[in-house]
Image (cartoon, rainbow, N blue to C red):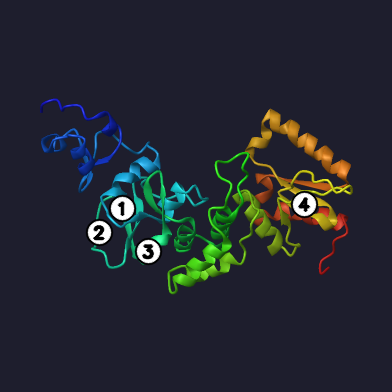
């Protein structure tokens, strides 16, 4: 076999469609060369693609399938929503094919044939993807109620402009409800209806959501989420992850980054502020989330009781 002519730079080290290769001047003969791997009709790659970012791997599969959009787990990953890790090959992509379109059967593609309205499609890096609210509803087929609440909390949370490249939520609770109302009879709808009752604006992480759900299910009051402590002088201070202003109890969920030296210093300073403000700080970590978060709930209950809370009040 003759050595293949080098591909144009823009097509190297990534999958591409035959159509874009032709536009770049690649001949049909070169596209038939054994050095290229066929990933499906109209899609080629010169080298393995498994380690590439998802947006690069999935792009040609969306481009060759008109009127389709990345959906379900694939959309959730592209939208950076919390999700259960996909089992099996990383090169299997979820795609919605609108009802009424021709049947689609391609390798590497899991096709979902269902209603898809034009306002339920957005773009991520130029790729057609179901919107956050539509993705949330589609994921009701696959996720538990708690996982669906976690994803919903992430959709409606208000970003922190100082740390993120956006300052508006991905969608609103009303947008999620609109999806439920629009797609009657859809698989997972009952689970979505149960989950939306539990979604709250204010949770900054999946761990905070799961902690809140565990606390409420244990019969404790529902906490406020990332609301500033207001001192006796009216000044706004830091924002506990979860809090009970009435009882002056603040709950801080500490992830892995809290072991870093700089963060340790900040955490100590925060604890000192709690004392100065007359509040009780409850620190929760992953080790408290075992056994359905019972250790975390126990710590929080103890702090509330010591602050004067009683069941039924």
Picture coordinates of residue 267 (x, y %)?
Answer: 75, 36
* Distance between the alpha carbons at the discs numbered 2 and 3: 15 Å
From the image, state whether disc 4 or disc 2 is nearer to you: 2
Q: Are marks 2 and 3 in contact (CB under 8 Å)?
A: no
Can you identify the residue that label 4 sits on?
Answer: 299
Secondary structure beneath dot 3 equals loop
- Label located before the other in sequence (2 or 3): 2
Q: Does 15 appear above or below 214?
A: above
From the image, state whether disc 3 or disc 4 is nearer to you: 3
Q: Residue 109 got which mark? A: 1
Q: Are marks 4 and 1 in contact (CB under 8 Å)?
A: no
Picture coordinates of residue 203 (x, y %)?
Answer: 64, 52
Secondary structure beneath dot 2 equals loop
- Label located before the other in sequence (1 or 3): 1
- Label located before the other in sequence (2 or 1): 2
Secondary structure beneath dot 4 equals helix
């Amino acid at each position: 076999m003759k050595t293949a002519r080098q591909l144009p730079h823009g097509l190297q080290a990534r999958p591409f469609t035959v159509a874009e290769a032709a536009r770049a001047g690649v001949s049909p003969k070169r596209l038939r060369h054994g050095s290229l791997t066929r990933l499906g009709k109209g899609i080629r790659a010169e080298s393995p693609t498994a380690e590439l970012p998802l947006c690069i791997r999935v792009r040609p599969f969306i481009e060759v399938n008109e009127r389709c959009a990345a959906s379900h787990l694939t959309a959730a990953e592209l939208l950076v929503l919390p999700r259960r890790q996909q089992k099996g090959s990383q090169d299997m992509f979820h795609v919605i094919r609108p009802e009424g379109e021709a049947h689609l059967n391609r390798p590497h593609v899991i096709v979902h044939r269902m209603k898809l309205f034009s306002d339920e499609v957005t773009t991520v890096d130029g790729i057609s993807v179901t919107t956050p609210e539509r993705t949330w509803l589609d994921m009701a087929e696959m996720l538990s109620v708690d996982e669906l609440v976690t994803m919903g909390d992430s959709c409606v949370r208000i970003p922190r402009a100082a740390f993120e490249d956006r300052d508006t939520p991905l969608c609103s609770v009303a947008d999620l409800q609109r999806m439920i109302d629009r797609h009657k009879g859809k698989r997972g709808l009952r689970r979505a209806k149960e989950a939306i009752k539990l979604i709250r604006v204010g949770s900054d992480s999946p761990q905070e959501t799961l902690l809140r759900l565990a606390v409420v299910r244990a019969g404790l009051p529902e906490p406020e989420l990332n609301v500033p402590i207001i001192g006796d002088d009216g000044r706004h201070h830091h924002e506990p992850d979860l809090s009970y202003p009435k009882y002056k109890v603040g709950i801080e969920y500490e992830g892995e980054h809290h072991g870093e030296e700089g963060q340790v210093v900040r955490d100590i300073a925060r604890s000192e502020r709690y004392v100065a403000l007359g509040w009780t700080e409850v620190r929760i970590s992953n080790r408290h989330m075992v056994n359905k978060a019972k250790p975390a709930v126990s710590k929080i209950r103890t702090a509330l009781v010591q602050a004067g809370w009683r069941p039924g009040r």
